[in-house]
Image (cartoon, rainbow, N blue to C red):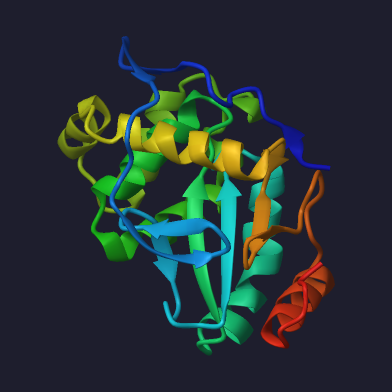
Amino acid sequence: MSRKTWIILGVVVLLVAGGAWYFLGSTGGSAAAPRAGNDPIAARDMTMGDPQAKVVLIEYAAPMCPHCAHFNNDIMPEIKKNYIDTGKVFYVFRVFPLGAPDGVAEKLGRCLPKDKYFPFMDQLFHSQPQWDPEYGVQDVRGALLQQAKTAGMSEEQFNKCTSDTSQEAAINQTASDGQSRYDITGTPTVIVNGTKVSPGMVPTLEEMKRFLDNALAGKPPG
């Protein structure tokens, strides 16, 4: 079962180096033409694959979420290889914060060169026990700094990134839009061509293949 979210539409407080920032509702990035049901793919969305693919796969995930780590580490590699890299599926990744470090992780990923965003998220999912407070990590800021350094970021760049408030409204807006559109109650939440296919559960590889194959055949994915 997916871990139930405790941050949805309210104020999200993120603590970094003794300071704080807040995610409040605001307008997000500019939107492109609708692709998945009534869900426009925004200019700020992080994507992989062919934008003209017949199937759009959207994932709402949280870097802290162990279920998301399982989905990323054990299921997505084959989906990427057989569906995204082959041009069959266009993949959209959106962060839905469950806790303060999720927002920090998203900001750090977006401060890196764009081609390092997905490798950094993959790195965080594979190394959750090293930085996630749910594993007993006490110095989360220091642990995330080490993750950022591994990805090629200096401490000066880390401090500048985490203190920059320009991403905050957009991160919150992405979560707010996802909640209102898909009634997200846990992560990962997986959407195939506008249909939520993971209500309260993590799809298995076999289920994901069936969802995507159905959509590719013009059938309802579920």
Q: Can residue 212 be seen in this view?
A: yes
Vertical placement of 129 versus 7: above or below? below
Q: Quadrant of the C terminus?
A: bottom right
User: How many labels, in total?
Assistant: 0
Vertical placement of 61 versus 195: above or below? above
Frontmost residue, 210 versus 111: 210
Residue for point 50% across, 84% down:
85
Q: In which quarter of the image is the N terminus?
A: top right
Residue 40 quadrant: bottom left
Q: Position of residue 143 (x, y in %)?
A: 43, 32
Left or right: residue 119 compared with residue 1: left
Residue for point 42% across, 31% down:
172
Residue for point 20% across, 29% down:
164
Frontmost residue, 83 versus 25: 25
Q: Where is residue 15 in the image (x, y as percent from the top left)?
A: 39, 16
Residue 33 quadrant: bottom left
Residue 50 quadrant: bottom left
Q: Position of residue 183 (x, y in %)?
A: 68, 38
Q: Where is residue 114 in the image (x, y as percent from the top left)?
A: 27, 61
Vertical placement of 86 versus 207: above or below? below
Q: Is residue 62 visible?
A: no
Left or right: residue 69 compared with residue 22: right
Residue for point 23% across, 58% down:
113
Frontmost residue, 80 versus 87: 87
